[in-house]
Structure formats: C-alpha cells, structure tokens
Image (cartoon, helix red, strand yellow):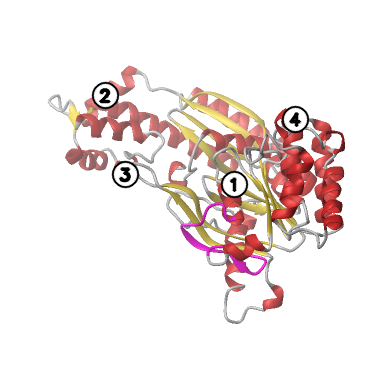
C-alpha cells in the first residue's frame, strides 16, 4: 500500500487533550528548543523566536486561552504568513512579538532581545515595525506627511533634518500617497488609511516588520501594489524579517516562504505554502448526515435494556447501563467536550437525570455513526481519512484519493450502501481545498481526536 500523505508526516503530536498537530509543528518545537541549549551556535540563531509561548486572557468566569504552547522561529529576511480564521489567535501572536501584550508563559526573542525583559530597548532601537489590524492609532487631525514626520522624529530616524525628510518622502512615494500627502488622515478612504498604517510599519526599514491583515480593506490594485512592495523589501532586498497575519490564501501564496496555520490559539500546521495547499487540494470533503433512529427502534432498544420501572437514568446508574449495553467507555462521552454527548451532559447537570428515551435515541445515533465510520474505514482506509468536524447528526471528513477513479467509485458505492442500511440519510462530496479546511475551523473549535470515536 502506498504511504498516506498524512502518515508520511509521522504520528500526530498531542501536547494537550483534544488537539491534533502536524508533525512539522513538533519538529519546529524541537528546533527552537535546540537553539536555546548550552551547545547552541550563537551564529545560527533565528532572528525571531517564540518558545512555548502561551497567553491567557482573564475573564469574569475563567481565563480564555488566546495562544497556547507555541514554539516557532523566523529566519532573518524571510516572509512568514500566520494563516487563520478570525479569533484563531494570529493577532495575539503578533501583539506579543510587537510588545503590545506580554505572554503569560514562555520566552520571546526578537533580534537578540528578550521582549519580556528588554522591551524598552526594543522600542528605543525600533527593532519592530508593527501595523495592527485596525487604523485607530492614526490621528485623524494630522496630515499624512505630518504623521510620517512625527513618527520619524519620535524614532530618531535620520541624522539630519534633510535625511529625515528624505526618509519621509521615500515612504510617501513608496506607498503611493504622494497626491494625498497634505490631506488630513481623517479625510482619507479606508484604503488610503491602510496604506498609511503599513507605511508606518516599514518606515526606516526596522529589522522585523509585523503586519496584521495588511490588505483587508484595500482595493485590488492597492493590494497588488502592497504585495510588490513587501516582496521587494523581503525577498529581493532581504531588508527585514516580515511576519504577516492573514486570512487570505492569495496573500500567503504571493508573499510567504513558509506558512503556519493557527487554530484556536495553537499552531496546528506548518509548511511551505505549496505543501499546505497540496494537502488541501489532494482530496475530497465528505459531509454526512447520520440517519435519525425511528421510534420503533428506540422502543425496541429500551425494552431490551430497561425494566418498565426504569424511566430515568442518573449519574450513579449511567456507568452500569453503558456496560450492560456493551460500550462501557461511552459513559465518558456524556461530557461537555463531546459533540453529541454534551447535550446529555447538559440535561443531566440541569435536571439530575436523563429520560431513557433521550438516552436510547443518543445511543442509537452513536451506533449508526460508528457503523458508518467502520464502513468508511473498511472501504477507504483510515490512513486516507481525517475527521474535520462533527456536530449532532452531521460530520465532515477530508478524504485523500490517490487513485481517484477507483477510490471515488468505492466511496460512492459504500455511501449508497450506508443509506440502504439506514446509517446515514444524506451525503455531499466535493473537492477539498485549503480554504474549505479553514472554513471548517471557523465553524467549530478544538477538533479533537476523541470526536473521531
């Protein structure tokens, strides 16, 4: 049998419950750890390093994990794209690198300076140029040229006034703001304000440039212009290390040498863009709706395992009942972290009991899901499938089809058989893309291995 594209990366790494990581992520973690050891070569250090960085945001109830156990390094002169959906943690990562917020745990090194201990030196030397996701840092009452002149003066750019003026005009011309340099920033369009923010980050060519969604509110022509500017700075001139947070796949393809996919605060995939795109394109996405059990089947199951007097289940009787029904470990699935068992856990916590009808309905649905999953594995092979999403009666898989015609026909044959056996009610199969996988991450949080079974 051919090596699976998933298996070729080695075993998945699980640093925390319910998290599935690409093996490249663990490889990167070990690489960063090696740079911190006593035998590390000081001349072969990454320009930017994050080691085991986490960020917890306190709330009234319990802290929210914005970034968890992230270790990654960025080479001097490279462009790295942090790819993720809104709320995934990519902006938090950039804020930590910029010193806008400090990590809860872990260490961050930027151009030889520790962000936590040497933030003052980083800012005094303007090691980092940072463009946040919004443009609220811009003063609407300043003119464009005045804004850049103030920024140059605050950061001691240029040894003389003439040199400083040259730097200001250089960034104005580079960003295409010549015609509006004397306009108030508050009168500019969103696109023009975005150009001012990006120009503020790259002005004076700091060693590290951080851009958070740089082209989110710009037109197509300006987007291409920005990409050309950034490619010139980073790829052609190697003038700075560029780290871009984005949701735009085209931006990753246009700019980056490497891409990290962030999901729920964790770096979960890590590779060159072409490889990540290949992993998305090389397969199919299968959406399946599990068939709802009929009332007759529910009554039949209840009569087989419940006495007439047993109308309800409690926490004390659940374990014994699951064991009697042949799956004792399923009692662990009745928890707040399980995609279908969470509703039973909620009812149990609220009422103190479960009706046997509700329990038997859930049990039959799980049996049908298991039967379908086994059929899929038998026909297709577990190494060639990955669960992306599961919710109530719906689940989504990514399938790898190395022998397209043969394997696709097998899948359709198996799906039709599963419908005949009443394990599923409907299905939808389409080509997989990296965008599709990212959209799945936007729909759900914490894709866990326990959801697979």
- Residue 357, which numbered label? 2
Q: Quadrant of residue 156?
A: bottom right
Q: What residue span does the magenta drawing correspond to?
A: 99-116
| Secondary element type, mark 1 | helix
**Distance Cα–Cα, label 4 vs label 2:** 63 Å
Sequence-wise first label, 3 or 1: 1
Residue 273 visible in the displayed image: no
Q: Is residue 150 left or right of residue 445?
A: right
Sequence-wise first label, 4 or 1: 1
Q: Are marks 4 and 1 in contact (CB under 8 Å)?
A: no
Q: Is residue 101 magenta?
A: yes
The location of residue 282, given as percent across then percent down, is 71, 42
Above/below status of 194 relative to 418? below
Residue named by callout 1: 90
Q: Is residue 339 left or right of residue 431?
A: left
Q: Residue at x 69, y 37 (%)?
A: 433
Circle 1 crowding by C-alpha within 10 Å: few under 14, some 14–19, many from 20: many
Above/below status of 412 relative to 112? above
Circle 3 crowding by C-alpha within 10 Å: few under 14, some 14–19, many from 20: few
- Residue 188, which numbered label? 4
Of 69 and 117, nearer the camera is: 117
Circle 4 crowding by C-alpha within 10 Å: few under 14, some 14–19, many from 20: some
């Amino acid at each position: 049998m051919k090596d699976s594209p998933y298996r070729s990366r080695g075993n998945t790494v699980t640093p925390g419950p319910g998290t599935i990581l690409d093996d490249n992520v663990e490889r990167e973690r070990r690489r960063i750890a090696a740079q911190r050891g006593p035998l590390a070569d000081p001349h072969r250090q990454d320009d930017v390093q994050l080691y085991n960085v986490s960020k917890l945001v306190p709330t009234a109830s319990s802290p929210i994990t914005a970034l968890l156990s992230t270790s990654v390094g960025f080479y001097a002169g490279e462009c790295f794209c942090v790819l993720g959906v809104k709320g995934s943690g990519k902006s938090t990562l950039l804020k930590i690198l910029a010193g806008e917020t400090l990590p809860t745990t872990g260490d961050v090194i930027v151009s030889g300076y520790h962000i936590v201990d040497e933030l003052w030196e980083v800012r005094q030397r303007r090691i980092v140029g940072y463009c946040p996701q919004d443009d609220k840092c811009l003063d609407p009452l300043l003119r464009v040229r005045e804004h850049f002149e103030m920024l140059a003066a605050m950061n001691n750019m240029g040894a003389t006034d003439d040199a400083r003026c040259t730097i200001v005009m250089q960034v104005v011309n580079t960003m295409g703001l010549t015609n509006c340099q004397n306009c108030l920033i508050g009168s500019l369009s969103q696109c023009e304000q975005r150009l001012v923010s990006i120009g503020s980050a790259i002005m004076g060519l700091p060693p590290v440039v951080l851009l958070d969604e740089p082209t989110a509110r710009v037109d197509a022509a300006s987007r291409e212009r920005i990409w050309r500017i950034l490619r010139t700075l980073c790829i052609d001139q190697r003038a700075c290390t560029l780290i871009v947070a984005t949701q735009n796949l085209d931006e990753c393809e246009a700019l980056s040498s490497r891409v990290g996919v962030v999901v729920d605060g964790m770096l979960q995939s890590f590779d060159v863009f072409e490889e990540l795109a290949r992993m998305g394109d090389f397969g199919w996405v299968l959406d399946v709706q599990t068939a709802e059990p009929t009332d007759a089947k529910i009554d039949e199951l209840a009569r087989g395992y419940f006495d007439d007097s047993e109308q309800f289940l409690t926490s004390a009787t659940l374990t014994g009942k699951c064991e009697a029904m042949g799956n004792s470990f399923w009692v662990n699935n009745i928890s707040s972290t399980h995609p279908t068992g969470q509703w039973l856990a909620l009812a149990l916590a609220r009422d103190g009991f479960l009706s046997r009808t509700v329990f038997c309905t859930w049990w039959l649905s799980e049996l049908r899901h298991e039967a379908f999953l086994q059929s899929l594995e038998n026909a297709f092979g577990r190494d060639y499938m990955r669960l992306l999403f599961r919710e109530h009666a719906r689940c989504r898989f990514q399938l790898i089809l190395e022998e397209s015609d043969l394997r696709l026909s097998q899948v359709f044959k198996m799906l039709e058989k599963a419908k005949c056996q009443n394990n599923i009610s409907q299905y939808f199969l389409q080509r997989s893309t990296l965008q599709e996988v990212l959209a799945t991450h936007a729909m759900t949080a914490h894709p866990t291995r326990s959801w697979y079974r």
